[in-house]
Image (cartoon, rainbow, N blue to C red):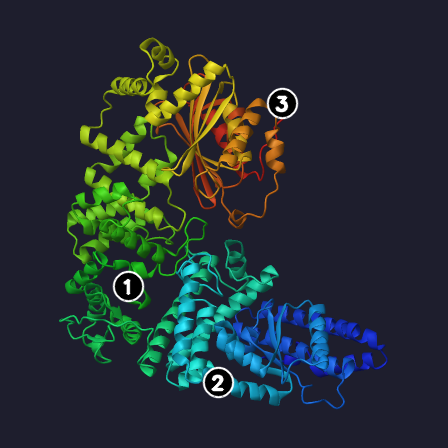
Amino acid sequence: MSEIPNRRAIIDRRAVAESIDAALADCAPDARRGTASRLLKAALTAARAELKRRIAAHPGRGLELAAAHCFLTDQLLRLAHDVALTHLYPAKNPSTAERLSLVAVGGYGRGEMAPFSDVDIMFLTPLRSTPWVEQVVESILYMLWDLGLKVGHSTRTIDEMLRMAKADLSVRTALLEARYVWGDQPLYDEASLRFQREIVSGEARAFIAAKMAERDERHRKLGDSRYVVEPNLKEGKGGLRDLQTLFWIGKFALQARTPEELADKGLFTPAELRQFNRAQNHLWAVRINLHDLVGRAEERLTFDVQRDLAERMGYRARPGVAPVERFMRHYFLTAKTVGDLTGLFIAHLEERFSRSAWLPSLARRPSRLNGFRLNRGRIEIPRDDFFAEDPVRLIELFQLADLHGLEVHPMTMRAANRDAGLIGEGIRRNPRANALFLDILTSPRTPERVLRWMGEAGVFGRFVPDFGRVVAKMQYDMYHHYTVDEHTIHAIGLLNRIEKGELRQDHPLSTAIINQIVSRRVLYVAVLLHDIAKGRGGDHSILGAEVAERLCPRLGLSPAETETVAWLVRYHLLMSATAFKRDLSDFKTIIDFAEAVASPERLRLLLILTVVDIRAVGPGIWNGWKAALLTTLYNSAEEVLRLGHKQTGRNERIADKKARLQSVMGWKDESFAAYAGRFPDSYWLSESPDVLAANMALVAQADLDQSALNVRCTPDATAGATLVTVYAPDHPGIFYRIAGGISLGGANIVDARIHTTRDGMALDNLVIQDPLGGPFDEPARLKRMESAIADALAGKVRLADRLTAKPLARRRQEAFRLAPQVLVDNKASNRFTVVEVNALDRPALLYALTYALYGARVTIHSAHIATYGERAVDVFYLTDLTGDKITSPARIKTLERRLAEVATAPGAPQSAELAA
């Protein structure tokens, strides 16, 4: 640990030992351990203050800081050991069994520790524990516990240590890191020698296979991507554990004790050794600052710490890029480096252990590889200057890999990475290079996998520089789970799977129409480019369309194809915005959308692009309710585009719905006419046949029972949501009370349609989901929900008091800053004023907004709720109390101000509502 500057400023072991010796000289035996612990505690407090100062002064010196924390732990252990042997249980004539060695294992043995890392130690003895050994071990442990250290410990003989190492991979790995700390060194040396001779020798292949399988399983559990926006920097893909796995394998297979020895043995080039050390240093710097920031052992870079870490580690804003985004991009590039090093490392080991069972083989040999060759089923270059002779081969390499289903040899990946700089403007304009790239992008085989390889080799970003600008670029929000490049490549993979029919169950409409598309390459290029301009300081849709107009001709697309791609990129958010934020029963919504789309081909393309874009955001984002809304919008727009923009047959559509409902329910003409006459035309136009039938059954039963208040929850497994129907006497404020009751019941409203019968009853249909976007369908929860709504409507609870008193844990949304925005639109609907509120999501936000609208004396006719991570978008279709649009500028201003104030406020509104 000589790399630690001024070690004695952290802790001077000799000075502390002298103070302990002096204090214990006249101390009663039973008070000695307590006295020693107090002095050690004082030394630890001073040392931690010094380490905090060093972290603040030099936050980027990860390895130095990790070694400094380990140095402190070593000194404390040595002091505790000496107190136990000198003052507590001295052995004047120790027997053969009364020997003890303190051995650091695991991460502590490696000499790397964060402020709150566990202290993993093994007490090594020659024979079974004697009373003296037990007393010494116990006293050392009690002193360490008194210091507040989290200690993982074991007491082993050498034979026990070896027996457990043979039986357990984790024990074997921990002992591989073993390091002598203090005590009987000959005993440690004997154990180390036997471990090397009896455990390590001849077992390299089995150990490597086991560690690689362990790594793959760990990646699978954590999402199997190094580009998740809240990464686990210890266990995640591309994190510290991956680097440590390389080191473990190197130690086991080649007895390399340091990274420098790995380079000496040919496993790394000097440049790769520098990359290894830089990656290790950066990951340790982030981990140590994370521990110091949160004051506990924490390994996840969650949103609530990313901004603070970026600030304390010195990242500054750049045009269009916030400090936190620069910090996270650096992290992702480091994770990519770790992945690259892993592939190269394993390739080198393959050369050393050529009979390795864990490496794949290929039964067939492609007949034409255009000068490339096969090595154990993987494509490789025949000589080192192969790419320099013709840089187009950098693209051809991946096209051949895709065409023949081959993997790329890691040594060839290294060469591609090295030579990616050969791709200049001439290669980018080369027709053959562009044709090869388009073949990869639109491949019917595995474009996602091969494009990801191209990205890892640095070839993708060089050949498409606009894509290179979004590599490792995070989107600092809770909605997007991946970096922009990973999201894009994943979306291409989803498109490929839809085309193959693999996602028919999840996306039946997309699967049905994808083969009707005239130009499939338009769709693939549009998916590639839809987010290409993110982070440029403007509307990425508009800027992305400009990129498409410039890039598509280069790729070989015709003017017509280029125009379509540019349109798709420009409007790739149109369909989701319309489906999730607008009332699809309002015919003007459909007309406006159809006019923007203009053709059935564009509609098909836009639907599929929208589907893969949403699903590629991350797990749990796509659900049945979104599928239902998009399907409704697609079918309605397709009908308009096919039959013309004129709304025809409004009365016929209403009559048809009534006739079908009467047939399903089996009512006689006179009774049905009386029932149907209670509802305005808007009710028949906005509700689906299933909802109309469910409503009719509820109303009929309520009238029969003469029940004034009726609430029914009906789960819809297909939509992944639950329909809540409320039938009660209409009165001002009924909707905000329903919203409050649903919030108390633990659900979120995602859609609401509000109807008033001609005889003064309210019939409201609301679609709810659980807070995670899943179906709210457990019978007990549904019962509680019905009771909560009924109590809210009956005035049995003070909603404002209950909602503000509800204890809330610190929410992830609090890490974000989002200024509320209120938009009032009188052009989106012929009958209603449409108000859109964008705000930071919080519990009971919808209740607060609807209560404010009640206070503003407006009537809510429908509400449409969308959540994008931390951002809530609530849209209301309103009229004044006379049923007209809100057109007064002064009233619109007042409405905007009132809603903005509510959206900004931290809690629910304080109302004076009473039990009434």
The residues tagged by marks 3 and 2 sit, at their Cα atoms, a distance apart of 79 Å
Give the residue at x 48% y 58%. Answer: 324
Checking the image for residue 198, the label placed there is 2
Where is residue 796 drawn, in percent x and y?
61, 25
Q: Amino acid at mark 1?
A: Phe
| Residue picked out by circle 1 | 460
The residues tagged by marks 1 and 3 sit, at their Cα atoms, a distance apart of 65 Å
Establish if 222 lies above or below 119: above
SS under mark 1: helix
Q: Quadrant of the C terminus?
A: top right
Precedes in sequence: disc 1 or disc 3: 1
Q: Is residue 898 visible?
A: no
Q: Kindly report which numbered mark, 1 or 2, lies closer to the viewer in this rendering.
A: 2
Give the side of residue 815 with respect to residue 86, left or right. Answer: left
SS under mark 3: loop
Checking the image for residue 915, the label placed there is 3
Precedes in sequence: disc 1 or disc 2: 2
Q: Kindly report which numbered mark, 3 or 2, lies closer to the viewer in this rendering.
A: 2
Where is residue 493 drawn, in percent x and y?
29, 55
Q: Kindly report which numbered mark, 1 or 3, lies closer to the viewer in this rendering.
A: 3
Give the side of residue 624 with respect to residue 152, left or right. Answer: left
Q: Amino acid at mark 3?
A: Ala
Q: Residue furthest left?
A: 367
* Number of other residues with Cα within 10 Å of mark 3, as a class: few under 14, some 14 to 19, many 20 or more: few
